[in-house]
Amino acid sequence: MQQNIMTCPACHKKIAIEAHDCPHCGQPIDDALRSQVRENQRIEAEKKRLEAKRSRWALLAIFILGMGWIYFQEPTAQDRAASLRRDAVPKCSSAIEAQAPYGFEWETLALEFIPRFPYVEHLVSDENTILLKGSTNIKALLFKNAFGVMVPMEYSCLYDTNCAQ
């Protein structure tokens, strides 16, 4: 409700709170009625302010609870696989690169964001070991042979998640 408007007690139309008489029906408006209307308007405004404050606190509490739930929830299988790949790829890459006595080169046949080990699978016999496999169709590992020729190689790596090797 607007602070400078009230309802006429006789005709129930809106009038200015400072009016001494209703411009619609001529009903006189006394000071006691004006004071009561102002007090009611002040109380309503205070209620709205408190309600808005409670709503802000409720939204903040919901936000904090939601962030806490996200932070403390169990990682998904996809999160665990991404984490394992992040840990395993540098170690497997260096182990495979060490097998090239004459040199090596990683050649990207597609876009650069494709990982060196696009295929990751858990071994059925041992759930703590994952097999990372590369493919010459997607990202080639080229080994230099004794004649200086770069030869594409298929590559794979067994990674023990317990020992991180």
Image (cartoon, rainbow, N blue to C red):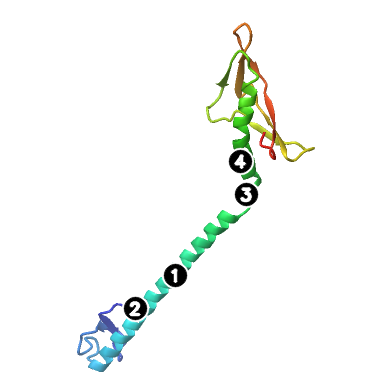
Amino acid at dot 2 = Ala
Question: In the rendered structure, are the residues bearing label 4 and label 1 in contact, judged by CB atoms less than 8 Å apart?
Answer: no
For label 1, the SS is helix
Question: In the rendered structure, are the residues bearing label 4 and label 2 in contact, judged by CB atoms less than 8 Å apart?
Answer: no
Discs 4/1, front? 4
Q: Position of residue 157 (x, y in %)?
A: 68, 28
Query: Disc 1 marks which residue?
Result: 55
How crowded pointer 1 is (Cα within 10 Å; few <14, some 14-19, many 20+) is rated as few
Question: In the rendered structure, are the residues bearing label 1 and label 3 in contact, judged by CB atoms less than 8 Å apart?
Answer: no
What whole-number distance in Å separates the C-alpha atoms at marks 4 and 2? 54 Å
Query: Disc 2 marks which residue?
Result: 45
Tag of residue 83: 4
Discs 1/2, front? 1
Q: Earlier in the sequence, mark 1 or mark 3?
A: 1
Residue situated in front as seen by the camera: 103 or 21:
103
Question: In the rendered structure, are the residues bearing label 2 and label 3 in contact, judged by CB atoms less than 8 Å apart?
Answer: no
